[in-house]
Image (spheres, rainbow, N blue to C red):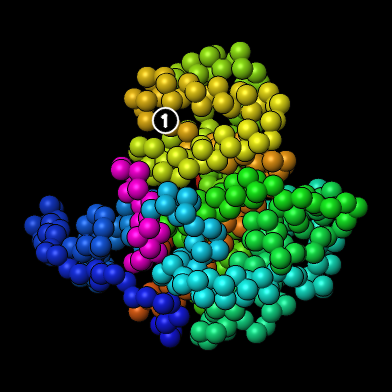
Amino acid sequence: MNTKSDTASEPAIESAPVGNFILTDSSTGESWELPARTGAMGNRLIDIKTLYGQTGILTYDPGFTSTASCKSDITFIDGNKGVLLHRGYSIEELAAKSDYMETCYLLLYGELPTPEQKTSFDSDIKSHTLLHEQLSRFYSGFMRSAHPMAIMVGVVGALSAFYHDSIDITDVEQRQLAAHRLIAKMPTIGAYAYKYSLGMPFPMPRNEYSYSENLLQMMFSNPAEDYEINPVLSRAIDRILILHADHEQNASTSTVRLAGSSGANPYACIASGIASLWGPAHGGANEAVLKMLDEIGTVDQVGKYIKKAQDKNDSFRLMGFGHRVYKSYDPRATVMRETCHEVLQVLDVNDPKLELAMELERIALEDPYFIEKKLYPNVDFYSGIILKAMGFPTSMFTVMFAIGRTVGWISHWKEMLNDDEQKIGRPRQLYLGEQQRSFIPLDKRGHTEKKTSWPWFWGK
C-alpha cells in the first residue's frame, strides 16, 4: 500500500542485510539461510519474510514479543538502558525544553519545527478544535454513567461520518487534514465526555489558550464564573501529554497499524487504538495505581502490603512499579516525578491517598528489595497521582493517555501508508483443534460425542 510520501524526512539509515543466520531442521538435516538485518540502533533481526515460502515452516511467537512487524524511524526504546528517543531526541530533553505541539510536529514530520512552522502548525490545530454541532448531540445517545473511554471509542469512530473530506487515505492532503483534526478535537471529545457525565453544558474551546491550557479550561471551567489557568498545572498537563505521545509498537499502536493495513479510514483506525488502550494491562495502569492505594488504605498499612508484594504466594501486586519494557528506571518517570512534586506543592492538597503514595515512593527508592528487583516507580505511578491531585476522576485517566497518544498513533499510521513493504496484517496460528472429521446428523449423535460447554466457548 504505497502512497505519495507526506513526511518531511527520510529514515536516517536504511535497514540492510548484515550476514545470514542458518536455520537447520535437526530431524532431516536440511538447512536454510535467512538474512540478518540491522537498523540505526537496537538489536539485529532475522528477516523471515521468505521463511514460509522456502520451507513451509511458520514461527510461533505469542504476543509478537520477539517479532518486528514493521520498520520505523519514529521512536526508539532501549529498555535495558532506560532510553526513549523520538526521532533521535531524548524524552527527557523534549519534556524539559519542548511543548506538546512541538513534539507533535516532530513525530508527524520528522524534524523540530522552525519558528514559522511552529506558529503555522499551532494555528492550524486551533482551527479544528470545535466539534460539529450534530456530533455534539451524539453524546445524548450515551448513558450519563457511561465510561468516558466508551464514549471516546464511539465518538472518534463517528468522525468519519461527519468529515467526508478527509477519509481518502490515498490523498496526501486529506491524510494531513485528518491528522490535524484528530489532534485538535481529541481534548474537546474527552472533556465533553466528562462534562456529559456531570450533566454540565459543553464548554467551547478557547483558541487563545495553548493546547494544554485549553484542555484544562474545558475540563474544569463552568459558564457561571471565570476560570483562571494555573501555569504549573498547565505545564504538568503538557508534560503528561509529551510523555505519553508515543511508545513504539505497543498494543494500541500495533492495533492502529493493523487496522490501517486494511485501508480503513483514519478515524476508524484511531478508534481501534483507543479501544485497545482501554485495557487495564495497557492504558489503565495509572487508574490501577489509585485502586491499589484504595486497597492499602492508610500509611500505617504500607509495611504490611510491601511484605505481601514480596510474597510470591500472595496475589497482591504493587501497581505503578517496574515496567515490562524498561529493565532499569523508566526515563519518563524521572521527569514525571519532578512534575508530581511541583503539582503537589502548588496545590497543597491534604489527601491521605497522596500521602500514602509518597510513602510508597520513598520506600521504593530506598528499600533494597525494590532496588535489587529494579521496581522503580514508573510513569503511570506519578501521572495517576498528578491527575488525582488536579481533580481528574480516575475514569478520565485513560482518556488523558489517549489524548496524548493520538499523535503517536497518527504518526505510525502515516508511516505505514508510505511503507513499500507493508501488507495487510495476517498473523498465522498454531492450530490445536480437531482434525477433519465427518458430520453426524443431529438424530444420530449420542453421548459419546465430546460435549461443548459455555465456559469453553467463552474461554477459561
Residue at 53% from the left image edge and 33% from the top image edge: 319
Residue at left offset 33%, top offset 57%: 67
Classify residue 54 as left or right of residue 282: left
Check the picture and name the quadrant holding the C terminus.
Answer: top right
Judging depth in this view, the residue of 386 and 48 nearest the camera is 386
Q: Quadrant of residue 291?
A: top right
- Image position of 22 with respect to 228: above or below: below
Q: Nearer the viewer, residue 21 or 139?
A: 139
Q: Which residue is mark 1?
A: 375
Vertical order, 321 against 65 (above or below): above
- Residue 252, can we see it? no
Residue 118 at x, y percent in the picture: 53, 71
Magenta segment boundaries in residue numbering: 71-89
**Residue 416 in the image, given as x and y percentages of width and height:** 43, 72
The kind of residue on which mark 1 rests is Leu
Asked whether residue 241 appears in the rendered view, the answer is yes
Q: Is residue 73 magenta?
A: yes
x and y percentages locating residue 320 in the rendered image: 52, 35
Q: Check the image and name the residue furthest to the front.
A: 115
Residue visible at 70% across and 27% down in the picture: 351
327 with respect to 23 (left or right)? right
